[in-house]
Image (spheres, rainbow, N blue to C red):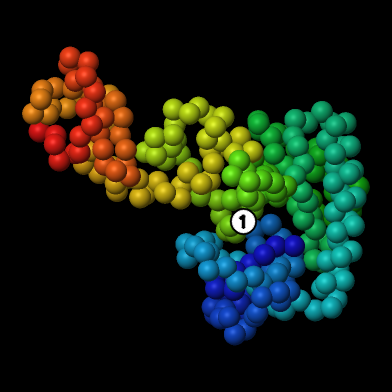
Amino acid sequence: MYTYSVRVYSWEPSRKCLSELEFIDGDMVVVKDEVCVEIGLIEKNDKFSKDEKKTAIVRRASARDIENYEKNKEKKLEILKLSKSEIKRLGLNMKLVDAHVSLDGNSAVILFTSDERVDFRDLVKNLSKIFHRSIRMHQVGSRDEARKLGGCGVCGRDLCCLRFPGSLPSISIDMARVQQVAHRGSERISGVCGRLMCCLSYEAAQYQQMLAGMPEVHSSVRLKEGKGEVIELNALTCDIKVRMADGTIVLVKKEALL
């Protein structure tokens, strides 16, 4: 089951925006996204980005829809079990993450991760014959896998990818550099998924603003005392630590630079 924000999704028959008056927290609805048609749960989320891709809500879930959803959960377990056996038999280098069975039960989407490109045509053909339904394979990244499996980060709280809905932001090493944590090594700035931590994006823009006009580390600067090399920056206090030509260390503000 997916969770959807009441503020950003469209009502498919009329294509008009939803309002909080049409659905309340906890309402079960039938949703249609890129994967398949499934049951979704309305959940208010004030932090949802306005730029997130919209997903169509088809209708309010009926008792029959919910009954089919419960039956599909059993089918999903069977699909995953037999799919793993077939993957092992074919010797494919892929790891199953999850499976989505459409509400009508006529199709299924199997999510997997892999470090390489996988030719799964024979796998899809065999699974379609076994389950007598349309089978589609969808490769996801390690961060999507972490969101599905859940867990805790080094901060002791739920993974960011699990707590915040919507598409995952792009995290770059430049975000770690601007916050002066890149030197800690990849292991200390990577999450359980093995990718750079999502939280690196939270304050990157603020650090860029605070560091505007400040020299880069290891660059040469001129003070009234003479030339020196920048060895450390403090974005919060705007202090610059400089090693002078005679080896002494001085702490100055950016206004002291000539």
Q: In this view, does 59 lie above or below 79?
A: below
Look at the image and tell me whether residue 217 can be seen.
no
Q: Residue at x 50, y 27 (%)?
A: 185
* Mark 1 neighbour class, 10 Å CA radius: few under 14, some 14 to 19, many 20 or more: few
In the picture as drawn, the residue positioned furthest to the top comes out as 246
Tell me the quadrant of the picture where the C terminus can be found: top left
The front one of 201 and 111 is 201
Tell me the quadrant of the picture where the N terminus can be found: bottom right
Q: In this view, does 78 lie above or below 194?
A: below
SS under mark 1 = helix
Residue 81, image x, y percentages: 89, 44
Residue 233, image x, y percentages: 30, 34
Q: Please give left or right for residue 121 compared with residue 133 in the image.
A: left
Residue position marked by numbered label 1 in the rendering: 163
Q: Which residue is drawn at 26% across and 38% down?
A: 239
Residue 216, image x, y percentages: 27, 31
Q: Which residue is drawn at 20% across and 34% down?
A: 252
Q: Which residue is drawn at 69% across and 39% down?
A: 113
Look at the image and tell me whether residue 154 can be seen.
yes
Q: Please give left or right for residue 231 compared with residue 4 in the image.
A: left
Q: In this view, does 149 lie above or below 215?
A: below
Mark 1 residue type: Arg
Number of residue marks: 1
Q: Quadrant of residue 240?
A: top left
Q: Please give left or right for residue 163 compared with residue 255 in the image.
A: right
